[in-house]
Image (tube, grey):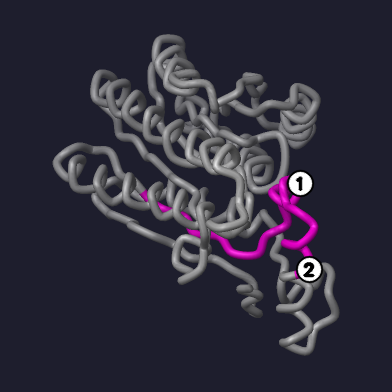
Amino acid sequence: MPAQHRDQAVIVTGASSGIGKSIAQRLGTSGYDVWLVGRSVEGLNATAADIARAGGPTAHCESLDIAKPGALAELVLRVGELHPHLFALINNAGIMHPESVMTGSPQRWRAMFDVNVLAPAEACRAAVQVMRRQGGPGHLINVSSVAAHWDTGGPYGASKRALEMISSTLRGELERDNIRITTVVPGGFATQLGRDFEPESFERIAESMRSKGLEPGVSELTVGDPDHIARAVRYILEQPVSINIERIVIRPPVDTTY
């Protein structure tokens, strides 16, 4: 286990399942002092237990509803008070309602923007304040989605496009700091985002797969292992801040855009 990472704190949101869990496990077993953020206490404890079993340091579990204004930013500031080196903030948590503008729910749109845009933006600002005070170096990683680049991404795609705009704006503001910001753009990975899908969304995905000659369901050609994202995140954190990795797109071989 790399000893130098013991003195570097990393905050990972959405760490109770899916991509966030994989990121937290890989960074925790690499020796980072990981702070796990999510809504499920049971899920966070399971992630922490996996890290410990693999020989990593004890992870910190923070059950938190990041949709609450300022909640995630407050946690970031608290970690900055408790740890001498906040090394990275990884905004992975997200809500996905793949619905149209005409038939969708404005209430669900607001929920997506609260979690997918406002919470990461507030947290990034808080993290920059901490990193500047501590002297860095530091990394901000925002997890977007390929839906941000679809012509018909709907409100969900719009929320992820907005997150990418936050990233690019911050990147310009931080050029002279020893803080770097990277956008990771996954497509088609096994997560729990589908828990928020309406039945018609699953049918659109199934129809897209049938149109490509694939049977609907899980396939390694269309659904990726979240650990691929985790390895990319670890790679980003291992690079010096003299290098600016702006954006990484990672998706399975077959595109099931619908």
Please tell me whether residue 45 is drawn above or below residue 153 in the rendered image.
above
Nearer-N-terminus badge (1/2): 1
On the rendered structure, is 122 left or right of 235? left
For residue 134, side relative to residue 218 (left or right): left
The amino acid type found where label 2 is placed reads Glu
- Image x and y of residue 247, in percent: 38, 60
Secondary structure of the residue carrying numbered label 1: helix
Residue 167 at x, y = what percent? 33, 47
Q: Which residue is mark 2?
A: 203
Dot 2 alpha-carbon crowd within 10 angstroms: few under 14, some 14 to 19, many 20 or more: few
The residue drawn where x is 59% and y is 51% is 230
Q: Position of residue 181 (x, y in %)?
A: 34, 46
Q: Which residues are magenta?
A: 182-203
| Amino acid of disc 1 | Arg
**Quarter-of-image position of residue 49:** top right
CB atoms at circles 1 and 2 under 8 Å apart?
A: no
Q: Which residue is mark 1?
A: 195
- Tell me the quarter of the image containing the C terminus: bottom right
Of 118 and 133, which appears nearest the observer? 118
**Is residue 200 rendered magenta in the image?**
yes
